[in-house]
Amino acid sequence: MSFITEKVLSGERISGEEFLQLAQTKDIHTLGFLADSVRKRLHPDKTVTYVIDRNINYTDICISACKFCAFFKAPEDGTGTLLTHDELEVKIRETKELGGTQILLQGGLHPDKPLEFYEDMLRFMKGLGIHVHGFSPPEVCHFAELSGLSVQDVLKRLIAAGLDSIPGGGAEILSDRVRQSLAPRKCSADEWIDVMRQAHELGLRTTATMMFGHIETMEERLEHLQRVRDLQDNTGGFTAFIPWPFQPDNTALALGADIQKETAFGYLKMLALSRIFLDNVDNIQASWVTQGPKVAQLSLFFGANDFGSTMIEENVVAAAGVHFRLSEQEIKRLVSDAGFEPRQRLMDYTIV
Ligand code: SF4
């Protein structure tokens, strides 16, 4: 352990084996200290950033039926919805009135909307003058499959219609054993990485997420982090990494297995391990939407340098029974109270 500690403190990269050794410790103080040293090296000033945005879920109709998802409606269910342009416009205007700069646009995997539908949606949204951070890799793969086009052609068309950047959703755990068990209809780990690689090569910046604390092993968490780190070494296209724990309420997975909610200890530990391992990803986001304001504030001492989004609207975590809400003023107070300087940012982390 002391050898790994010295390595981290001297700015050296740790190996997968060393990650697994670190992951065994219950010494949360040392993990926090090490993660904080990495954060300080990458962000020597006291800035903690946040973005003002809104999650818009254009549809909850989805053919994937992921076992961990409490949000989707099966197409045959008949209760799912698809937002109209008018509804999109109201949401975007409200966001802009609150100082918002971007929309996180994601939806279920709709069974039959053609690619032109998404291109129209993007053109309409861009006409209202907002950054569109949209369509996670499973959606891009789904559009490619439905349209018979390559992922590259789908990305090029979405970019031409106005797509600005891609959120890292749908990564869950980038290990095919886990994906096959929890979300067999969704893209594979290789496909998720490939969409991100191609997006980076086409000049888009993207984020990466990890949803942990369900059926995965620590080795599979490492596999996930290793894939993100390897791609980042090649492309440098990830702006941020956002780890957050599985929220079990109202999900099929929680009904069929004895899975308990991740503790604050487990969250902070994984956050710190991510900060230490992903030495090439500049920003790590706290997940106040799953952890609440108090643990999110503590996360600033466990590797996080970004408070994420104000999330004027959020539906996916809320469907799993978790309803934390924070205003911009509350985010600023939490950040300042912890001794940092809150600064509003854009998707690419430039300061507003
Ligand atoms: S996580 Fe996404 S892809 Fe999976 S069921 Fe929910 S909406 Fe569909």
Image: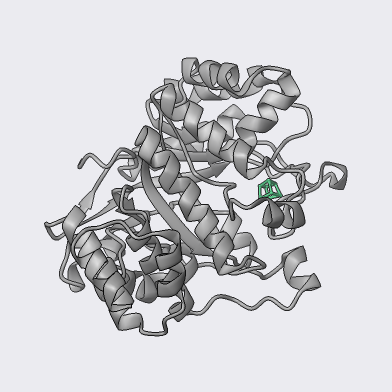
Residue drawn at (69%, 59%) of the image: 70
Residue drawn at (20%, 53%) of the image: 42
Say whether residue 281 is left or right of residue 114: left
Image quarter where the C terminus lies is top left
Taking depth in this image into account, of 109 and 260 the one nearest to the observer is: 260
| Residue 138 x, y percent position in the rendering | 63, 38
| Residue 3 x, y percent position in the rendering | 28, 73
Say whether residue 325 is left or right of residue 344: right
Taking depth in this image into account, of 219 and 62 the one nearest to the observer is: 219
Taking depth in this image into account, of 218 and 100 the one nearest to the observer is: 218
Q: How many marks?
A: 0
| Residue 333 x, y percent position in the rendering | 23, 67
Residue drawn at (76%, 48%) of the image: 184
The reply to whether residue 115 is visible in this rendering is yes
Image quarter where the N terminus lies is bottom left
User: As displayed, is residue 201 above or below residue 74?
Assistant: above
Name the colouring of the figure: one colour
Displayed quadrant of residue 200: top left
Q: Which residue lies furthest to the right in this view?
A: 76
Q: Which residue lies furthest to the bottom in this view?
A: 26
The reply to whether residue 237 is visible in this rendering is no
| Residue 177 x, y percent position in the rendering | 70, 55
Residue drawn at (30%, 56%) of the image: 13
Q: Which residue lies furthest to the left in this view?
A: 45
